[in-house]
Amino acid sequence: MATAHATQRRPAVLGDLLPGSLARDAALVAGAAAFVGVAAQIAVPLPGTPVPVTGQTFAVLLAGAALGTGRAALGMLVYLLAGMAGVPWFTDGTSGAGFPTLGYVIGFVAAAAVVGRLAQLGGDRTPLRTIGTMLVGTVIMYAAGVPYLMAALGVDLAKAIDLGMTPFLAGDALKVLLAAGLLPAAWKLTGAARR
């Protein structure tokens, strides 16, 4: 008599540790969008630039790593489309599509997807790998946000970098280091770390 024994899959990302499937995934997608929306309200305006310091980018990176490619990208797409449709959860409770920082929000979708994929491959298990994963995600957000800012404001690339990237590099480095401490620690606490 053959006995069937269930093999338990190792979780690819932290979101896989939660039970369920479709309901869990829907809740995680909605939760990721809401998490970024709440983080967007943590905003500090900087003089001389239309781009504020926010908690959004940190939330996007964490959501990407915790949820994996599909759920994270879908969560950011929900955030983007709902905000464009009128949900007031962009920075300072704004919504719509007529603002020069929309490119960063568009970049959130790709950044979350790539960070999610890197996390699925183990890119959030150690501090060093997490730093690399978060840097890739940060670069993707800048790659979408800075050119959009340049076009929206009618400035050259150097000016767009001065307005939309340079003032934020130190803060982004801090966010990357914070993630490098949090994510590997979360895996260690779950006892499910691998690779």
Image (cartoon, rainbow, N blue to C red):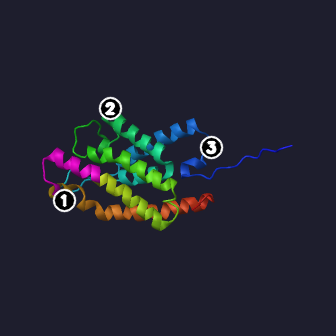
Instruction: Name above or below for residue 141 compared with residue 102.
Output: below
Dot placed on the residue nearer the N-terminal end, 2 or 3: 3
Residue type beneath disc 2: Ala
Residue 145, position as x, y percentages in the image: 26, 50
* Frontmost residue, 2 versus 185: 2
Q: Distance between the residues labelled 2 and 3?
A: 32 Å
Span colored in magenta: 143-157
User: Does 40 appear in magenta?
Assistant: no
Residue 179 left/right relative to 99: right
Label 3, residues with CA under 10 Å away: few <14, some 14-19, many ≥20: few
Task: Provide the residue designation for mark 2.
Answer: 85
The kind of residue on which mark 3 rests is Pro
Q: Is there CB contact under 8 Å for labels 1 and 3?
A: no
Quadrant containing the N terminus is top right
- Tell which residue pokes out farthest to the right in this image: 1
In the picture, the disc for residue 19 is: 3
Residue in view at x 25 percent, y 53 percent: 45
Provide the residue designation for mark 1: 162
Q: Quadrant of residue 19?
A: top right
Are discs 1 and 2 less than 8 Å apart at CB? Answer: no
Q: Which amino acid does label 1 sit on?
A: Asp
For image coordinates 55% across by 59% down, the residue present is: 186
Q: Is residue 125 visible?
A: yes
- Measuring from the top left, give residue 119's x and y in whole percent: 49, 55
Element at label 3 = loop
Q: Between marks 1 and 2, how big is the CA–CA gap?
A: 30 Å
Task: Examine the rendered structure and indicate whether residue 29 appears above or below residue 141.
Answer: above
Q: Determine the residue located farthest toward the top in the rendered image.
A: 85
**Label 1 to label 3, Cα distance in Å?**
45 Å
Q: Is residue 33 visible?
A: no
